Image: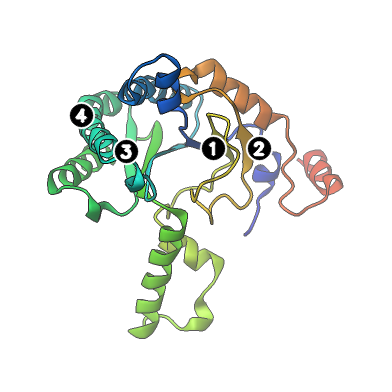
């Protein structure tokens, strides 16, 4: 991984990645069905998108539905799929008006044809927007991402397009579902758990981690500002020493 002086000295995250955890527990604490928590979480998504667009964050990635989430109760999975569809239909014009580019990552083949079509239409409608790239990870897993990248590379080697000696970190990056995007600078997980849960395993190699007990529906713009403030207070070295980073600052 090559690291520029700007990356070493950056005081603001270009790419924020979030595991939005705690919707169900938020509802249960209020003696409500888990579905209520999932719906409440949509408001926090809007707040995060608005914050990032207004503060010149380039990319916001949200882990909406993991490949492991299919193990949840069937009724909850159906509700999540219905909420996903209704949110797409309701939010796409709002995102387009705010100049937000929408991009989905993950294995779409498990979704209904109608939902897949809606996802493609949303991407097409917003593809030229520049204020923010909003990445929604659905039926996504970091291991899946690495496997599908390896399959693409293997197929190119088998067909003679590539030779195995050409395999580099950059080549793998170019075949991940996040190709063309900067790696996350700041990873946030709400809800109190402190693990990455198979999210962007390759991409998070040098990402700053921020964990909070705040449940996702309660995670508002001030909460996001606190996470960014924590990020700003850290020194990112990427294998360099503190002295090297400070020397870069003096040189610039």
Q: Is residue 160 visible?
A: no
Q: Quadrant of residue 32?
A: top left
208 or 36, which is in the foreground?
Answer: 36
Image vertical order of residue 226 relative to residue 166, above or below: above
Marks 3 and 1, Cα distance to the nearest angstrom?
A: 16 Å
Tally of numbered discs: 4
Of marks 1 and 4, the one in the foreground:
4
Residue at image point 47% right, 22% down: 51
Q: Are marks 3 and 1 in contact (CB under 8 Å)?
A: no
Q: Are marks 3 and 2 in contact (CB under 8 Å)?
A: no
* Residue receiving disc 3: 102
Q: Is residue 53 left or right of residue 36?
A: right
Marks 2 and 4, Cα distance to the nearest angstrom?
A: 38 Å
Q: Is residue 126 visible?
A: yes
Q: Are marks 1 and 4 in contact (CB under 8 Å)?
A: no
Mark sitting on residue 10:
2
Residue at image point 62% right, 59% down: 1
- Residue 36 location in percent, x, y? 32, 20
Q: Are marks 1 and 2 in contact (CB under 8 Å)?
A: yes
* Residue receiving disc 1: 14
Q: Is residue 244 left or right of residue 14?
A: right
Q: Which secondary structure, mark 4?
A: helix
Residue at image point 41% right, 73% down: 153
Colouring of the image: rainbow
167 or 188, which is in the foreground?
Answer: 188
- Residue 128 location in percent, x, y? 29, 39
Q: Earlier in the sequence, mark 3 or mark 1?
A: 1
Q: Which secondary structure, mark 1?
A: loop
Q: Earlier in the sequence, mark 3 or mark 2?
A: 2
* Residue receiving disc 4: 86
* Mark 4 residue crowding within 10 angstroms, few (<14) / some (14–19) / many (20+): few
């Amino acid at each position: 991984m090559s690291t520029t002086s700007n990356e070493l000295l950056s005081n603001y995250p270009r790419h924020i990645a979030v595991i939005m955890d705690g919707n169900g527990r938020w509802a249960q604490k209020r003696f409500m069905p888990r579905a209520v928590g999932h719906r409440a979480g949509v408001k926090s998504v809007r707040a995060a998108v608005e914050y990032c667009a207004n503060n010149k964050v380039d990319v916001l990635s949200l882990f909406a539905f993991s490949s492991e989430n299919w193990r949840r109760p069937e009724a909850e999975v159906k509700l999540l799929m219905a909420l996903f569809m209704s949110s797409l239909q309701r939010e796409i014009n709002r995102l387009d008006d705010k100049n937000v580019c929408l991009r989905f990552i993950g294995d779409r083949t498990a979704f209904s044809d109608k939902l897949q079509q809606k996802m493609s239409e949303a991407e097409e409608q917003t593809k030229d927007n520049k204020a923010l790239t909003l990445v929604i990870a659905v039926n996504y897993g970091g291991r899946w991402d690495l496997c599908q990248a390896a399959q693409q590379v293997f197929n190119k080697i088998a067909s003679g397009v590539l030779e195995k000696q050409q395999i580099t970190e950059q080549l793998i990056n170019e075949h991940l579902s996040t190709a063309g995007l900067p790696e996350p600078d700041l990873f946030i997980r709400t809800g109190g758990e402190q693990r990455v849960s198979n999210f962007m395993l390759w991409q998070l190699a040098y990402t700053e981690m921020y964990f909070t007990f705040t449940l996702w529906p309660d995670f508002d713009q001030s909460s996001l500002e606190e996470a960014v403030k924590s990020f700003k207070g850290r020194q990112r070295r990427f294998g360099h020493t503190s002295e090297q980073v400070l020397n870069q600052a003096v040189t610039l």
